[in-house]
Amino acid sequence: MKWPLVGFVLRRVGQSLWQLRWNHLLTATTMALTLSVFGAFMLLQTNLEHLLKNWGEQIQLTAYVAKDVGSSEMQNLLERVKALPEVERVALTSQEQAWREFRAALGEQSGLLDGLPRDVLPASLEIVLKPAERDGPLIEQFAVRLRQDKAIASVEFPQEWVDRLALIVLAVQWLKWACGGLLFLAAFFIVGNTVKLGLLARRDEIAIMQWVGASEALIQAPFVLEGLIQGLAAGALSLGALWGAFAALRGEMPTLAGFLAPLAQPQFFDRRNVALLLALGSILGAAASLFSLRRFTEKWLASH
Amino acid sequence: MIQFQHVSKTYPPGLHALSDISFEIAKGEMVFLTGPSGAGKSTLLKLIFRAEEPSAGQILIDGKDITRLASRAVARLRRKIGLVFQEFKLLPELTALDNVALAAQVIGAAKNDSRTKAFALLRELGLHGRYDAKPMTLSGGEQQRVAIARALINQPMLFLADEPTGNLDAEAAHETMGHLLKIRDQGATIVIASHDLDMVNRYGTRVISLRHGELADDLRRVESGSAAS
């Protein structure tokens, strides 16, 4: 595009933003509302994933050491397990420690243990896996491998919770795509219709530009640029609204999270998600403008 | 300059706007298209500036077939054509000067150059002192002169006018025709659609008549003032 035409486009955009400021404000607000709903889902997903990550860290395997394993062999076992690539960290609970913890857990009922030998409880390894290994089938495979070690009597892990965790992760993923896709489609048509109002207000200008030989790109450029600016403004507006809602609800989060409260540290978007929401707004505005403009000019030109 | 070869235009679901129209207009000619409302005058003009595509036949402008053109080629074609309408079609929020300059700016002229050209054209058309006036504050005749200046700014080889005097009083109408004659004398080809028979009889050296979408007459006026087929 020639430089005078770039100047022409920028002047037209500036004039239009000022002359049709209420129309543009209406469009930006409509987009901001849609982006806010979409952003709220993103925010929910971000926090849920964060919650799941923290929750996942609590899931660990317990490997009970065989009774006949001596203390030096137990240290070797600890080193062997530590060296496994799936393991993030591992802690050894000796028989003595297990006994003390059990007594403490029984509290006033600890007298029940009187007369029992202090080595009645087995020593155990508390194993936390690396995040990438916390998937249900992977944990099970790891448990099977551990059981093959002669120094290990049995392995336990909360299979039911692992399965539920995997299901929640999957549901969030599907919800994100299904709701995101539907909202985007709805927003596209809502914005497209709002853009049409602006186009109707400027139909004479479009027609005159067509009659005097302006290229299609030149006719479309100001509208697409306006859509992009509106989308960017809508993205910023929605971020502001979401931040306001987030700040207001942050204090209520521990109550809402219930038993998971210790794991729920509310988080707002990181830079990547802020950029994503702004980019989504811009693309939505520009694409909806272009789509409406093409349909409008085709229909309008044909009827005049 | 313009050749229509067996051109027809049919709108769905079968409305024949034009049927088998053939004629030729030479460079520098001034031709009136006449006929009652609905005869097909405006459709014929739209076919020339490619707002419409013919359903059948061929249209040649300056030897080039414009029947099937890509959108870029349509834009290039329109840069060679000046258009004037009965309703003037000026942008109300722009001044007279900016309305004219806009036509040059959209095809790549720098803002200052286009305004200088627009200024000269408006002065030539007797609108000195009205450069900064908005269309609503101008009379019908003045608005039509602004529209003519806008059509002239890109130095078109072809000038199309759809009922250019339809909204003007007699004095402004004759003034407008005077400007069109001047443009013709400078070498441009002019096609005017009009049902104003007084105007046609007074200025028409060639008159193409349409009736029910068909070519009814193609009359050329000889210098003595009589008409010959």
Image (cartoon, coloured by chain):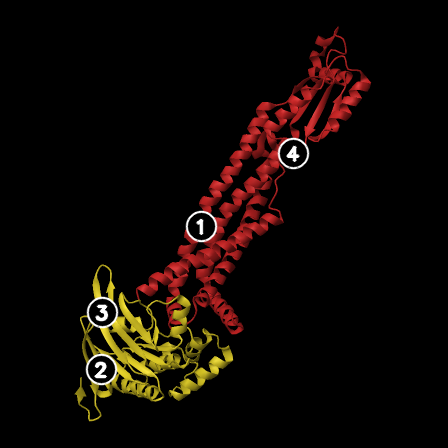
Chain colours: A red, B yellow
Q: Report in which chain the residue with disc 3 lies.
A: B
Q: Are marks 1 and 4 on the same chain?
A: yes
Alpha-carbon distance for marks 4 and 3?
Answer: 75 Å
Residue flagged by tag 2: what amino acid is it? Answer: Val
Q: Tell me the element at label 1.
A: helix
* Structural crowding at the residue carrying mark 1, measured as other residues with C-alpha within 10 Å and reported as few (<14), some (14–19) or many (≥20): many
- Three-letter amino acid code at the position of disc 4: Pro
Q: Residue furthest top?
A: A115
Residue A302: x, y in percent? Answer: 32, 64
Q: What residue is pinned by disc 2?
A: B207
Relative to B96, is A43 on the left or the right?
Answer: right
Instruction: Determine whether the residue tagged by mark 4 lies in a helix, strand or loop.
Output: helix
Q: Are marks 1 and 2 in contact (CB under 8 Å)?
A: no
Amino acid type at mark 3: Leu
Q: Is residue B100 above or below residue A171?
A: below
Q: Position of residue B13 (x, y in %)?
A: 22, 59
Residue A195, located in which quarter of the rendered image?
bottom left
Residue A131 is labelled as 4
The residue mark sitting in front, 1 or 2, is 2
For marks 1 and 3, give the one nearer the viewer: 3
Circle 2 chain? B
Chain ID for label 4? A
